[in-house]
Amino acid sequence: MVKIMVEQEQFLGESPEFTAVLRAAALVAPTDATVLVSGESGTGKELLSRYIHRNSRRNREPWVTINCAALPESLAESELFGHAKGAFTGAAINKKGWVQVADGGTLFLDEISELPLSIQAKLLRLLESGDCQGVGHSRITRVNVRVIAATNKNLFDLAKKGLFREDLFYRLNIVPLELPPLRERLDDLSLLMQSFLTAVANKNSFSPAYFPKSTMAVLNRYSWPGNIRELRNFCERVGILHAGSEIEVANLPWEMQQDNSGGALDTIGGMFTLPNEGLDFLQMERDLIGQALQRTNGNKSRAARLLGFSRDTFLYRIKKFSILT
Ligand SMILES: Nc1ncnc2c1ncn2[C@@H]1O[C@H](COP(=O)(O)OP(=O)(O)O)[C@@H](O)[C@H]1O
Ligand SMILES: [Mg+2]
């Protein structure tokens, strides 16, 4: 198991999908290389980026976070690169931009896909030479910043469609790190849950809530669109509302129960109910095996676990149905 402290927070995981990313991050951290962290919302992009900064030579220097989606286009350039007194109406004094504030340290550009195209050229120049020119300044100054960018979009696709500068994409993509969605690292689910539940219990002097197998089975099948952020909020909620007690399937929010009742199957208290019209058992087994393989990207051990089979039983069944993987 990997358990690392990033400032006050734990960074946890033991699935190969997660530890591989962490290993790469540890290798790149002490260098000055630009890093592009991608992954769905809530997968830990910001935490990973802070981990990289904390483990770099710049760890005593500034860490500056910019959410590009929150930068109004009209102000983005002066916010980032600063402006000279009188450069535009309201520019009463010379002002530093965030890039200058980050000098010597790390600039974290979150949601980089939202950076206005007009600013992207300036960012490219900064990355290539450290050159930085504030709005209304005639002089170019040089800064020493390391850039870590994060995105939940596919920048390559955006670049192909002309919605993101291709040259900037290649410059950012020097070291790409991709955090897997939680549904593809379900091996970490109970570890993360335990950590979040213990934290909320300790903070409030409650006993932690606990989860029987039937409930865990539902959580393992849920797609977790909000990833670790959603899991963390969920654990806080049940940890408070159901402190010290068992969480039954019926206590779960409807979207989690919903997600689980795919197709003809209804669940009551975590058990399957035979539909009135009956079902084709072999077809169902074949379908479920196919789905399990799809959900785990063909990882047979994890697919077996999702269905409660041993690996051997699972392999036997795959053969029986001649499902080729
Ligand atoms: N591996 C992990 N272990 C423990 N907590 C995590 C882990 N990854 C993410 N988190 C937590 O999940 C939440 C979302 O992480 P964040 O880095 O903000 O995600 P993103 O930037 O991808 O949206 C944060 O509260 C963070 O502390
Ligand atoms: Mg984020």
Image (cartoon, rainbow, N blue to C red):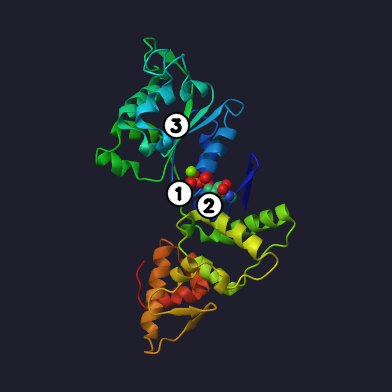
Residue behind label 2 places its C-beta within 8 angstroms of ligand 1? yes
Residue carrying label 3: 34
Residue at horizontal 59 percent and vertical 73 percent from the top: 248
Picture coordinates of residue 75, whole percent (x, y): 39, 27
Residue ID for mark 2? 229
- Name which quarter of the figure residue 176 lies in: top left
Quote the CA–CA distance across marks 1 and 2.
8 Å
First reached walking from the N terminus: tag 1 or tag 2: 1
Residue 39: percent from left, percent from top? 43, 47
- For marks 3 and 1, give the CA distance: 21 Å
Residue labelled 3 has its Cβ within 8 Å of some atom of ligand 1 = no
Do residues under tags 1 and 2 come within 8 Å of each other at their CB atoms? yes
Q: Amino acid at mark 2?
A: Arg
- Which type of secondary structure does the marked residue at label 3 adopt? loop
Is residue 301 at least partly visible in the picture? no
Q: What's under tag 3, amino acid-wise?
A: Thr
Residue 143 left/right relative to 74: right
In the rendered image, which residue does mark 1 sit on? 41
Q: Is residue 171 above or below residue 265?
A: above
**Ligand 1 within 8 angstroms of badge 1 C-beta:** yes
> Which of 1 and 203 lies nearest the eye of the viewer?
203
Q: Residue at x 34, y 41 (%)?
A: 155
Q: Secondary structure at mark 2?
A: helix
Give me the residue at 38% from left, 89% from top.
278
Amino acid at dot 1: Ser
Pointer 3 local density, CA inside 10 Å: few below 14, some 14–19, many at least 20: many
Residue 283 lies left or right of residue 311; in this view the side is left
Q: Is residue 299 above or below residue 148?
A: below
